[in-house]
Each structure stands twice: as structure tokens, then as C-alpha cells.
């Protein structure tokens, strides 16, 4: 069978997505490989397809213990013999799995990194033919990543102990060069094939709001997503509890997740969310690495997270099946301070020496600054994000809050010169201020705290922007910072000039800012909900799926994703061949579920003969 035939037969997809075919072919040729692809891009297929085609068993190392069961269930649903070994198994189940593995009946074996050192596991790995070792979430090996796991450093030792070195493939959604180099080096990859696909996820809408009342804004968004599943991320445990309680009081079906809960509650809440018994999960960032629930329609950040890496990863949990989804950040200035506090008081990396820790703290502060730029930005959010991850992008995406709101370009060349001159004049007098104070000075504030400087008599730039609103003045300063015409330094984030500032004055560089048009029409803040073509049929198919899922005790999306149901609504298949052409229907699922779903479609068509 060709890779494409395997994709169709087992997974029900007719085409590879970007990067998948190249990675698979390279793995099949025997090379090591590194795949860097954003969440939801389809990394699993890249190792699962070759695993099925190669002689022997593939070991997949993953830190996501709580998800292994789901991953393995999903594979089995597709008729793929898979199993997992981790600490959640009872001694008996562990033994049973081991003997299953030894009988040669397992093609893909998931294991937690801690397992690698155990004797029974080494025994398997040394006795059985291993076609490939796949390292999932490979960035965990690097202390530069956001999820460093010391146990990942043991993987290289494990590989050394194998009688024959299998090919190795590593996957992550984290893109930075440092992390990528660490992955290659620390896992001991041999001249790996590298594939980095674009980071853009076109189906995601990105929005930032700066509401006076966050909870009110949250309720508003939830009302725009009735009967849909979503995640609300909060920065602290306390806030998780508060927001979750308030949502429940307001009649929203919500549950919570953070590291302070008992294992039992965490597991129960996660399951309620995965199985669609509860619509909204309120959580800290402890929830979710690798959550592959496919029908998450929105991810709302109640607070700004500490960096864009985390933000993109968390937001990326929306719309994994390719359906349109919303990622909305509720920003407030307080979030910046909370994050600063968390960075300064972080107990992470306690095992590192002080110099390295200081270096990491500084890096974190820089990342936080970029996150703040994103949150306060006036022009295309997607462009900023892609640019941050090292990709060039169009200046206008049309699917973010900045592009969606009616913006107009406003020339701010003169204002930019005023701002830069003001900083320059202040610096001449050895004075440095942050953005808020500079705004006051430019607008000629009479506040008492400035009296001692006697700006009115001595500073020519005092009050030269009195005609500009405070908000616009702040936006202009922020824009100059984001475009690196001026800098911000030190504990108090004071504004300073840099090499570009002089150029700005000397060359009279033209600078423009996207500003909101006068009185924009009242419009929805999020994208329009895409409704399936036949809402009624879609609902009936969902009901059928819910019943089957309950019968088999699996989450609904493991049977079919929303995207697959939507495709059924479009194709209206009535016989096997047609059903197989639906995206997400492979051979096994056709056999198992074809009839019940086609029955639903048949009876829908009987009632709606005109369709
Ligand atoms: P991630 O890169 O985050 O690990 P997954 O492997 O979980 O992503 O894939 C995300 C979703 O995309 C899954 O629902 C998967 O079935 C689907 N998918 C993967 N490859 C394809 C493809 N070639 N065609 C259609 N859907 C695909
Ligand atoms: Zn945009």
C-alpha cells in the first residue's frame, strides 16, 4: 500500500496536508526526521502512517499520560492495533498489555518517558523489532522550551541501549531555532530531514478586547457561541475558581481545571469536557498540552498569558478539525503586572545556577513585552504573530479583530517626530519616563507630580500634542515601540531613543497608524458563526453520534469530528462508496458506523424531498 492508500483506508482522508507526505516519505526511506508544525496541523499522521507501513513496532514517547488512553482508543477505532504503557495502568492491565506487545499484536505503542528506564520496558525494546522511535512534544527536551521535562533527557540513553538503532522522528509545535537545535542534539538525531510548515491556521479568528468588565465581555462571547464547546484560560487558580463559579451562577455549563485540585476532580472534570457533558472548561495553563478534542469552537484568554508561544499553543486548541473557531484575548494592563510578578517569583528551573536563571528571566521579560505589543496592537494581529515566529505575512489578514474592525490609516509622521523629540529633550535633562507619563507631558498635563520640573517654562515639547486624545497618544507611542523606532528599558520600562529614532527625525520617515474609523457600525465582535448547510440534519447526525459514543463510552469526536459530520451534510451519502468519500471516514469506520449515519441521512431526505 502507498502512504496515500494507508491514509485513506485507516484515517479516511484523501489528501495529505502540507508537509505530511514529505515527512512520511523521508521516514520510510530510513532517515531521522524532525517535524515542526503548529497545533492541529496533523503531526500524528506523520508517524502513524509510516508506523503502519514499516516492519516491526513503533514506540511513541509522549509526556501526556492522561491522553494516551484517548489516543489509543482513537487508533483502535480506526482498526489500528495500538496500546499504551504508563503509570495509570493497574499492575494487572500493565502485565496484560506487556503480553499483548510480546505476542506481536501491537503496531504502535505509546509510553511515558519514565517507562523507558524500567526493566520490563527495556526488555521489550531489546527483544522485539522496533521500526521507529517517535518523540512527541519533543520541545520538552530543551530547557529553552516552555515545558522542559528532565525525563526527556533520558531518551538518548534509552536509544543507546537498543541492539539496533531504529529511525527516530521528533515532533513539536514549538518553532524557535534554539529549541530545534536542542532537539537534534539532545536526542542524538542523525542528519535528520527537517520539515517546518507554515504557522498560520487560517480557520482561526484572532481577537483582542480591552473590556472594562471582563466577565461581562466573557458572557457576551459565550452568548455568541450557544451550544458550543470552548476553553477559558485564566492566569491563576483563584481566578479559575471565581470565573467558573460565576459562570455556573449565570447558567453556563462550566467546569474547572488547575493544578491545585485533587487528581480525581481533575480527571472527572476533564472527562466531562471531553465527552461534551459540559460545554465550557475554565482552566489555568495546566490544562491542555495535547488536548486533542477536535470540536473546541473558542478559546478565550481571560488574562494575557506570559508569551506568544504559550498564547499560540493554547489558542491553537481551537478548531483542530479545521472548522472555523475563535481565539479571543481579554486584555488589561493589570495582566502585564501579574505576569511580571510571576516571572520574578518563578521557582521553575530551581536546579539551574543563578546566572542561567537570570538569563532566562530576562528572556521571559522580553517575551512578555512582545505579548503586550500583540495585545495592544492596532493593525493585523496575525501578521504580528507570524512575524514573531519568523514567517513573513501579509499586512492584512481579514480574519482578526484589527482587520475586522473598520480601521483607517492615519498619518502620524508629525506626531512621531513630536514624540521622539520630547524623549530627546527629556533625556538632555537626564529625565526618563514611561509611556503614561510621557503621554501626560506631551498633552501638557497640569498634574501636581510634574510641577517640580517646571516643564511649562522650560520644555519646548510640553503640551505639543494637547490636541490628541490620551488614548490615541498612547496608541502612537505603543506603535513606535512595536515598530522599534524607540525602545523601552529597565525596571520602570522608561522610554529611550535608539538608532532608528535619529533616522526618524533626520529622514522624516513616513509613519502611519491604523486607527478606528469614526463611530464604527455596531457589529459582532467575533466571526459570524458558520452554520452547517442543514442545521437540522447536522443536529440529527450529532444525536446519532452522541448515542453511539455513550454506548461505547468514548468521547463523541473519537467517532466522528464535527468537520466530518458537516461533510456528510454536504455530500449526503446514501451508499458505501459515497460514505467513504466523506473526509474522516476510513474502512473501519465505514463498516462500523456507515449504516446508522446513512439511516439518519435517509430519513432526513424522506422528510425533506426537495434537498
Ligand atoms: P497535531 O499536529 O496538533 O498533533 P493532530 O495530529 O491531532 O494535530 O491532527 C489534528 C486533526 O487534523 C485531527 O483531527 C486529524 O485527524 C486531522 N488531520 C490530520 N491529517 C489530516 C489530513 N491529511 N486530512 C484531513 N484531516 C487531517
Ligand atoms: Zn488581521
Image (cartoon, rainbow, N blue to C red):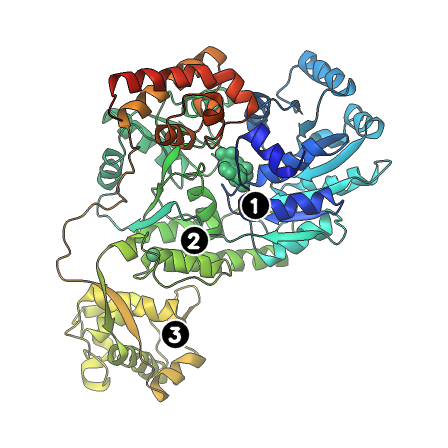
Helix, strand or loop at mark 2: helix
Does the Cβ of the disc 2 residue fall within 8 Å of ligand 2? Answer: no
Q: Nearer the viewer, residue 265 or 598?
A: 598
| Residue annotated with mark 3 | 486
- From the viewer's perspective, tell me whether residue 483 is left or right of residue 286: left
Quadrant hosting residue 405: bottom left
Tell me where residue 71 sits by quadrant: top right
**Which residue position is annotated with label 1?**
348
Instruction: List x then y, in percent, for residue 155.
Output: 73, 40
Farthest residue to the bottom: give it.
Answer: 506
Q: Residues within 10 Å of mark 2 (few under 14, many from 20)?
A: some
**Occupied quadrant, residue 394:** bottom left
Residue 449: x %, y % from top left: 23, 69
Q: Position of residue 388 (x, y in %)?
A: 47, 60
Q: Are marks 3 and 1 in contact (CB under 8 Å)?
A: no
- Sequence-wise, the earlier of marks 3 and 1 is 1
Q: Earlier in the sequence, mark 2 or mark 1?
A: 2
Q: Which quadrant does the C terminus fall into?
A: top left
Q: CA distance from mark 3 to mark 2?
A: 21 Å
Task: Decide which of 107, 279 is in the foreground and name it.
Answer: 107
Say which element carries label 3.
Answer: strand
Q: CA distance from mark 3 to mark 1?
A: 32 Å
Q: Indicate if the residue with disc 1 has its beta carbon within 8 Å of ligand 1.
A: no
Q: Residues within 10 Å of mark 3 (few under 14, many from 20)?
A: many
Task: Give the labeled residue for mark 2.
Answer: 340
Amino acid at each position: 500500500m502507498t502512504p496515500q492508500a494507508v491514509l485513506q483506508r485507516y484515517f479516511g482522508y484523501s489528501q495529505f496536508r502540507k508537509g505530511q507526505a514529505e515527512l512520511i516519505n523521508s521516514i520510510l526511506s530510513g532517515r531521522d526526521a524532525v517535524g515542526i508544525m503548529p497545533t492541529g496541523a496533523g503531526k500524528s499522521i506523520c508517524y502513524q502512517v509510516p508506523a503502519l507501513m514499516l516492519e516491526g513496532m513503533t514506540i511513541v514517547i509522549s509526556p501526556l499520560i492522561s491522553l494516551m488512553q484517548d489516543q489509543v482508543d482513537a487508533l483502535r477505532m480506526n482498526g489500528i492495533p495500538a496500546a499504551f504503557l504508563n503509570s495509570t495502568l493497574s499492575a494487572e492491565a500493565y502485565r496484560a498489555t506487556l503480553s499483548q506487545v510480546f505476542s506481536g499484536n501491537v503496531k504502535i505503542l505509546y509510553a511515558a518517558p519514565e517507562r523507558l528506564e524500567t526493566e520490563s520496558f527495556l526488555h521489550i525494546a531489546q527483544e522485539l523489532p522496533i521500526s521507529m522511535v517517535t518523540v512527541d512534544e519533543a520541545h520538552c527536551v530543551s530547557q529553552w522550551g516552555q515545558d522542559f521535562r528532565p525525563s526527556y533527557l533520558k531518551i538518548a540513553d534509552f536509544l543507546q541501549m537498543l541492539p539496533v538503532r531504529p529511525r527516530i522522528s521528533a515532533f513539536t509545535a514549538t518553532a524557535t531555532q534554539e529549541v530545534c537545535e536542542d532537539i537534534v542534539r539532545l536526542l542524538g538525531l542523525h542528519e535528520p530531514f527537517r520539515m517546518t510548515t507554515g504557522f498560520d491556521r487560517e480557520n482561526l479568528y484572532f481577537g483582542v478586547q480591552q473590556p472594562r468588565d471582563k466577565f461581562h465581555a466573557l458572557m457576551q462571547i459565550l452568548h455568541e457561541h450557544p451550544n458550543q464547546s470552548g476553553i477559558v484560560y485564566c492566569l491563576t487558580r483563584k481566578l479559575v475558581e471565581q470565573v467558573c463559579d460565576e459562570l455556573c451562577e449565570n447558567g453556563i455549563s462550566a467546569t474547572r481545571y488547575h493544578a491545585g485540585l485533587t487528581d480525581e476532580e481533575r480527571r472527572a472534570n476533564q472527562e466531562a469536557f471531553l465527552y461534551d457533558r459540559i460545554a465550557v472548561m475554565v482552566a489555568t495553563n495546566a490544562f491542555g498540552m495535547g488536548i486533542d478534542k477536535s470540536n473546541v469552537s473558542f478559546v478565550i484568554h481571560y488574562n494575557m498569558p506570559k508569551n506568544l508561544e504559550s498564547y499560540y499553543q493554547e489558542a491553537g486548541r481551537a478548531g483542530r478539525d479545521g472548522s472555523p473557531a475563535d481565539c479571543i484575548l481579554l486584555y488589561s494592563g493589570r495582566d502585564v503586572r501579574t505576569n511580571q510578578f510571576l516571572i520574578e517569583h518563578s521557582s521553575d528551573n530551581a536546579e539551574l545556577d543563578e546566572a542561567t536563571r537570570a538569563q532566562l528571566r530576562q528572556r521571559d521579560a522580553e517575551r512578555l513585552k512582545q505579548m503586550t505589543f500583540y495585545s495592544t496592537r492596532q493593525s493585523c494581529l496575525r501578521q504580528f504573530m507570524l512575524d514573531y515566529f519568523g514567517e513573513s505575512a501579509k499586512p492584512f489578514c481579514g480574519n482578526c479583530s484589527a482587520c475586522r474592525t473598520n480601521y483607517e490609516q492615519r498619518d502620524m509622521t508629525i506626531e512621531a517626530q513630536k514624540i521622539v523629540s520630547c524623549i530627546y529633550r527629556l533625556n538632555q535633562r537626564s529625565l526618563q519616563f514611561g509611556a503614561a507619563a510621557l503621554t501626560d507631558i506631551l498633552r501638557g498635563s497640569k498634574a501636581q507630580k510634574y510641577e517640580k520640573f517646571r516643564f511649562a517654562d522650560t520644555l519646548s515639547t510640553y503640551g505639543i500634542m494637547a490636541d490628541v486624545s490620551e488614548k490615541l497618544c498612547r496608541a502612537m507611542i505603543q506603535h513606535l515601540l512595536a515598530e522599534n523606532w524607540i525602545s523601552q528599558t529597565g525596571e520602570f520600562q522608561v522610554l529611550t531613543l535608539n538608532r532608528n529614532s535619529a533616522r526618524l527625525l533626520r529622514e522624516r520617515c513616513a509613519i502611519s497608524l491604523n486607527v478606528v474609523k469614526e463611530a464604527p457600525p455596531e457589529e459582532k465582535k467575533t466571526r459570524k458563526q458558520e452554520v452547517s448547510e442543514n442545521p437540522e440534519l447536522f443536529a440529527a447526525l450529532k444525536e446519532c453520534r452522541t448515542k453511539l459514543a455513550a454506548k461505547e463510552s468514548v468521547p463523541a469526536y473519537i467517532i466522528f469530528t464535527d468537520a466530518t459530520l458537516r461533510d456528510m451534510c454536504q455530500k449526503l451519502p446514501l451508499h458505501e462508496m459515497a460514505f467513504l468519500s466523506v473526509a474522516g471516514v476510513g474502512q473501519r469506520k465505514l463498516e462500523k458506523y456507515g449504516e446508522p449515519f446513512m439511516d439518519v441521512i435517509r430519513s432526513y431526505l424522506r422528510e425533506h424531498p426537495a434537498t
